[in-house]
Image: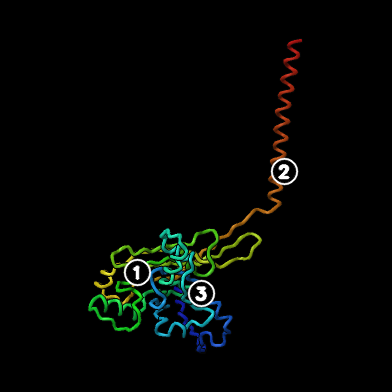
Amino acid sequence: TLPPKPQPRHSMHLADSVPSVLFNNASPKKLLGHRIPLRVHVTFPHLHCSALDYSHDGNAWSSGKFEHYHKAPFTFTKRKPTVSEYKESTKSGVENNRAIEKLRLEGCTLLGTLQVPRVGGTISVSVSPDAWRRATSLLSFGVDPSKDPDPFHGKMPNVTHLIHDITFGAPFPPGDNPLQKTHHVMDNESGVALANVAVKLVPTTYKRTFYAAKETYQASVSRHIVQPETLAAQRSTLLPGLLITYDFTPLAVRHVESRENWFVFLSSLVGIVGGVFVTVGLVTGCLVNSVQSVAKKMD
């Protein structure tokens, strides 16, 4: 007779469901560990600071939401560009400092550092909505809705700009920063366009000999210029300027620079020196024997 078939057994383990609150009792210093510094240094040489707006994840400075989410000292500031910043951003070749002092008053530099979470987001530096409505109203209808002086002098705003430096977290030492010294020239007739920059960040642990491991980020960047006709055809709500979209890859890289220890080096050195002595001894012995053999034959 066949043995009885084993009966399947089912077991179920019950566990208490405990609700968890994300970062409920975490201190600000602990929360800061889940964020990375985002440093931005951009100069618009032909855009006045009163007409410049910036935002992070849709929270614009002009609406007051940016300052609500980003408190000092982790925030952005607008100021007039320095002489060196203006020269670098225009590449005009103007050497007259008096002329540059007058021209740089029409530009604006955005500088600052934010603490952003390690998730994808957007940074926008563009013409402010009020300035854009004013410029389009003047050109389309000849009507100026504002009584303030026109910063564009009856023309469309030129959003040509220079990215001095945009850095996410700690830079990767062996690599270059693709968002450094990047010039976006709007060479169409109006000077209006959108520089769309997509950044893919790869978390990288960098370890050197005798140094502690360093958490860095490598960046892969793709960019293109969106012309105003394309923005109008797509009925986009984006304003001319600079748009940076960044995201983090789910994979991480560990880069380790290592050296062999001193014992391996010494053993290799001893082996090389010993080999040299043995080789020299063999060659010397062969030469001595050859000379002796020749001398005997001559005698």
Relative height, residue 177 to residue 11 (above, below):
above
Disc 2 residue crowd, few under 14, some 14–19, many 20+, Cα 10 Å:
few
Three-letter code for the amino acid on which mark 2 is drawn: Val
Q: Which mark is residue 65?
A: none
Q: Earlier in the sequence, mark 2 or mark 3?
A: 3
Q: Earlier in the sequence, mark 2 or mark 1?
A: 1
Q: How many marks?
A: 3
Between the C-alphas of marks 1 and 3, the distance is: 25 Å
Per the image, the residue denoted by label 3 is 113
Across and down, in percent, residue 206 comes to 57, 63
Three-letter code for the amino acid on which mark 3 is drawn: Thr
Disc 3 residue crowd, few under 14, some 14–19, many 20+, Cα 10 Å:
many
Work out whether residue 39 can be spotted. yes
Residue at 73 percent of width and 26 percent of height: 285
Image quarter hosting the C terminus: top right
Per the image, the residue denoted by label 2 is 270
Residue at 71 percent of width and 51 percent of height: 263
Please tell me whether mark 1 sits on a helix, a strand or a loop: loop
Across and down, in percent, residue 89 comes to 43, 64
Across and down, in percent, residue 124 comes to 40, 74
Q: How is the image coloured?
A: rainbow
Q: Nearer the viewer, residue 162 or 45?
A: 45
- In the rendered structure, the answer to whether residue 72 lies left or right of residue 267 reads left
Between the C-alphas of marks 2 and 3, the distance is: 54 Å
Q: Earlier in the sequence, mark 1 or mark 3?
A: 3
Three-letter code for the amino acid on which mark 1 is drawn: Asn
Nearer the camera: disc 1 or disc 3:
1
Image quarter hosting the N terminus: bottom left
Nearer the camera: disc 2 or disc 1:
1
Relative height, residue 76 to residue 209 (above, below):
below
Per the image, the residue denoted by label 1 is 158
